[in-house]
Image: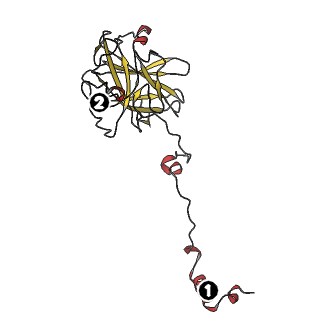
Amino acid sequence: MNLVKQLPIGLGLACLMMMSSCSKEDVQTLEPLKSERTDASMRDDGGYIKILPIFHATFGPLGSNVYPNGWQRGSSTSSNLIGYPTGSSNFTHLFGNPAWPWVNPISPIQDVPNASSFLTISTKAKKTWTEDGASTGKRSSVETIVKNLTPGKMYELTYYTTSSVCAVKQNNLTPAYASAVVVDWIYSNGTKKSALTMSLKNWEGTWNKQTITFEANEKDQVLNFTAFTESESTFGYAHIFVDHKSIKEVEPLDSPF
């Protein structure tokens, strides 16, 4: 039986009018919602979803032996948690402790006005050209695993460093600014390769933006930060800040030959 015959006359006429006025071009198929993971900006030239590299930011809670997600105390330097502390500090106090103010507050990070915390390492090791193993017990370090690298690809890391003086004497040593920060790659076979040595002279309490360009050797690589002073009779603190977007893949440098 014809379906229209079973409908009330008015409704049947309305259906006929609608069917006669519609065409296939008027009917649109709903598209699925696009998520961030399937957006074109997250896909490579082949259409596959990119696995982006990770260089963990240093935002996090404050405290001695307290670290942001993805960071930890380095194992290649002193294990003395009290003598050579590490942790997360703010711009006015060591590890955010009201009893340990900086002699002078650390300046804000100009490029990152929302920064509220950063990592702190300590040292009484004098910087030498040889940097023999004897100095590892006189300084602390922090490290992170830079993840999702593609061996053979070039990457650029960006971070900030500075130094400050605590108003409270540590280890009965004269408080002083740290003189340098050394950054090392530590590979899965235990070997270590220097990435960059940055002088902190003329940057006391002011952030110095640093950039490392490197070719990845492994999918995941440990990046270690440690510090030095001008004299082993002084004790200093150095600081490291990393933003959320501090790593990117770059094109290899063109060879001049």
Vertical side of 204 occupied by 43: above or below: below
Determine if residue 257 is in view.
Answer: no
Q: Nearer the viewer, mark 2 or mark 1?
A: 2
Q: Residues within 10 Å of mark 2 (few under 14, many from 20)?
A: some
Determine if residue 13 is in view.
Answer: yes
- Type of amino acid under label 2: Thr
- Type of amino acid under label 1: Leu
Cα separation between marks 2 and 1: 77 Å
Vertical side of 210 occupied by 46: above or below: below
Q: Position of residue 99 (x, y in %)?
A: 31, 25
- Along the line of sight, the residue nearer the viewer: 25 or 196: 196
Secondary element under disc 2, as helix, strand or loop, is: loop
Q: List the single residue furthest toward the bottom.
A: 9
Q: Residues within 10 Å of mark 1 (few under 14, many from 20)?
A: few
Q: Which residue is mark 2?
A: 92
Q: Position of residue 110 (x, y in %)?
A: 28, 37
**Number of the label disc, if any, that sits on residue 16:** 1
**In this rendering, position of residue 170 left or right of residue 192:** left
Vertical side of 200 occupied by 138: above or below: above
Return the disc, 2 or 1, that comes first in the chain's sequence.
1
**In this rendering, position of residue 96 left or right of residue 248:** left
**In this rendering, position of residue 28 left or right of residue 86:** right
